[in-house]
Image: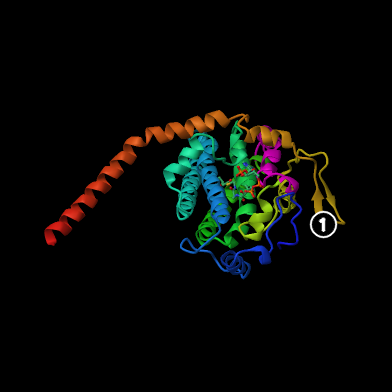
Amino acid sequence: MYAQQIKTGARRLKSLAEMEPQERAFQEHVDAGSKIEPKDWMPDGYRKTLIRQISQHAHSEIVGQLPEANWISRAPTLERKAILLAKVQDEAGHGLYLYCAAETLGISRDQMLEQLHNGQAKYSSIFNYPTLTWADVGMIGWLVDGAAIMNQVPLQRCSYGPYSRAMVRVCKEESFHQRQGYDSLIKLCRHGTAAQKEMAQDALNRWWWPALMMFGPPDGESVHSAQSMAWKIKQNTNDELRQKFVDQTVPQADYLGLEVPDPDLRWNDARGSYDFGEIDWEEFHRVLGGDGPCNRQRLEDRVRAWEDGAWFRDGLMAHANKKADQKSLGRADAA
Ligand code: 3HC
């Protein structure tokens, strides 16, 4: 793996022979498919990239609640409202698991949220797009959660124990998310009116390309892939997972009778995969740089939620401190 460079343009990886004994033992442990646990020795770079990836994954989960929350009060039926409520609530739970997994690496929840609020940390670019119609909620379930599953299933085999274990439950719940989204689009496209089908097509036109961007930049621009794969944090390159997603999703669009907005999309028999058009990486970098349709609103909403919740956090801390004081007083009396 070390000598064989993943064609990502990333810096050259150290060979086993170049590693200090402790790092070599760590790498051999990872290569043997064993898990690294919080108390194990790990290279600083391994810790750093896990904090980066897990905390940004957690931020994506809680910011990802915002576009859908926009439709909870406007869901077309009580059943759809209940399903959407359950899904948005799940995402909060995913954020919790992931913040807890990141905390095992030595960063606090407050530090991570500070990095989100001050723009230092990223969250998935997909959540900077608006949900203009009810069909967008179905698209998020089908495409966004579908892409999330594609990228999260391999993370169940990640070398870092707490992250891989958090992914098991997250992936189970994401399957429900994807299914409910696709089910609502079947209602619109196969059992709805022409106007409802048109609403779904409009939503696909707006969500298709940003969903492909969820897998990250092309392999040649991915700065982290090579090392993340050597450390078995990542099992696949960005382009591999993107291709798998396209191959799986295009037939689902066909079943809905929707047209994928890519004139270059065609089945390539020789490759056994779809060829597809060029992604607008300018747009990707623009949205990552903060200039997407909803970046400012998403951060404002998150900061306001944090500030509005301060009284509740203070109350919890006061209660916890009081209990701790009582306990230590009780110990003093008993002594
Ligand atoms: N949005 C925002 N930033 C992105 C991005 C995207 N779609 N794709 C890549 N980036 C960032 C990376 O974070 C990195 O920036 P950084 O150094 O400041 O962190 C830079 O672009 C270069 O990308 P790399 O490919 O080199 O970075 P990674 O190796 O980290 O790969 C990744 C990017 C594939 C997103 C990887 O971090 C990953 O697999 N993360 C875990 C899964 C995840 O976070 N998914 C996001 C969606 S979660 C979701 O949708 C849940 C839903 O239920 C709400």
In the image, residue 71 sits, relative to residue 97, either above or below, namely above
| Nearer to me, 138 or 244 | 244
For label 1, the crowd category at 10 Å Cα-Cα, with few meaning under 14, some 14 to 19 and many 20 or more, is few
Q: Position of residue 227 (x, y in %)?
A: 65, 55
Q: Position of residue 180 (x, y in %)?
A: 57, 48
Looking at the image, which residue is at 26% across and 43% down? 318
Q: Does residue 287 appear left or right of residue 310 in this picture?
A: right
Q: Is residue 204 visible?
A: yes
Looking at the image, which residue is at 63% across and 53% down? 151
The residue range painted magenta reads 192-221
- The way the protein has been coloured in the rendering is rainbow
| Magenta highlight: main SS | helix
| Nearer to me, 82 or 275 | 275
Q: Quadrant of the N terminus?
A: bottom right
In the image, residue 17 sits, relative to residue 320, either above or below, namely below
Residue under label 1, please give it.
272
Q: Position of residue 248 (x, y in %)?
A: 72, 53
209 is within the stretch colored magenta? yes
Q: Position of residue 226 (x, y in %)?
A: 69, 54
What's under tag 1, amino acid-wise? Gly
Q: Residue furthest bottom?
A: 32
